[in-house]
Image (tube, rainbow, N blue to C red):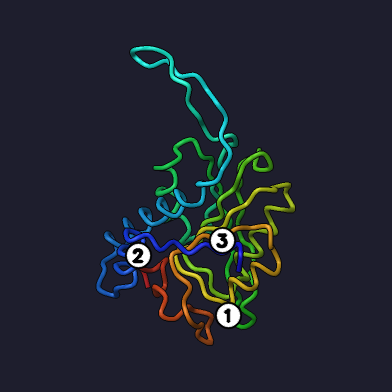
Amino acid sequence: MSNLFINEHPLVQSKLALLRDAKTKSKEFRELVGEMAGLLCYDAVRDFKTKPVEVETPLGTAECKVLDKEIGVVALLRAGIGMADGILNMIPTAKVGHIGLYRDPNTLMPIEYFCKIPKDAENLHIFVLDPMLATGGTASAAIQFLKERGVKDITYICMVAAADGVKKLQSEHPDVDIYTAALDRALTEDGYIVPGLGDVGNRIYGTK
């Protein structure tokens, strides 16, 4: 699993513990999702290329570095929306898109119902955001959708992953790095991660 990166930073793991806790209310849960996404993004850009720029400070000229490529985020509806603000806090210039996919309850295969991505997505490094990598079907379909539209540089960010989902993503998209805070042990028959976080969309928005 060479392209799987599990963030063991104490802050990440502490926030993950709060996210797992069934007693965490929607407001706090929502805030934690954004904070976690920002920390995972920070880790994911660690090895990105930079380019030199000159910046005028109040006292002179400074030789600085900035990211060499523009960033885009594509949130998978609906739970992925909760992660987008956390990354925009880190990279305010990032462009944002959304893809809507749902799993057929019988086949667990992804079905697309909405798509809106930046017009120049093929020139961006795209972070695909989805809190949970369970079976991997939705994530793989979304990534394939982006590749068909010319996107070459893609990173997948989730908060919790299951081994089955990681295996599927690595098999179908070995060029895509996966950043997460945990690799959980199992999936239920309905495709939910155990111990996981529960239904993240419901927990973010206070719905059932």
Q: How far apart are marks 3 and 1 (CA)?
A: 25 Å
Dot placed on the residue nearer the N-terminal end, 2 or 1: 2
The local crowd at label 1, few if under 14, some if 14 to 19, many if 20 or more residues have their Cα within 10 Å, is few
> In the image, is 109 to the left or to the right of 159?
right
Q: Mark 2 points at which residue?
A: 13
Q: In this view, does 171 lie above or below 27?
A: below
Q: Which of 145 and 106 is in front in this view?
A: 145
Which of pointers 2 and 1 indicates the residue nearer the eye? 2
**Which residue is most to the bottom?**
189
Q: Mark 3 points at which residue?
A: 178
Q: Which of 43 and 88 is in front in this view?
A: 43
Task: Residue type at mark 3: give it.
Answer: Ile
Q: Label 2, label 3: how many angstroms apart (C-alpha)?
A: 17 Å
Please give the count of numbered marks on the rendered protein: 3
Q: In the rendered view, tell whether residue 141 sits above or below residue 194.
A: above
Residue for badge 1: 105
Determine whether the residue tagged by mark 2 lies in a helix, strand or loop.
helix
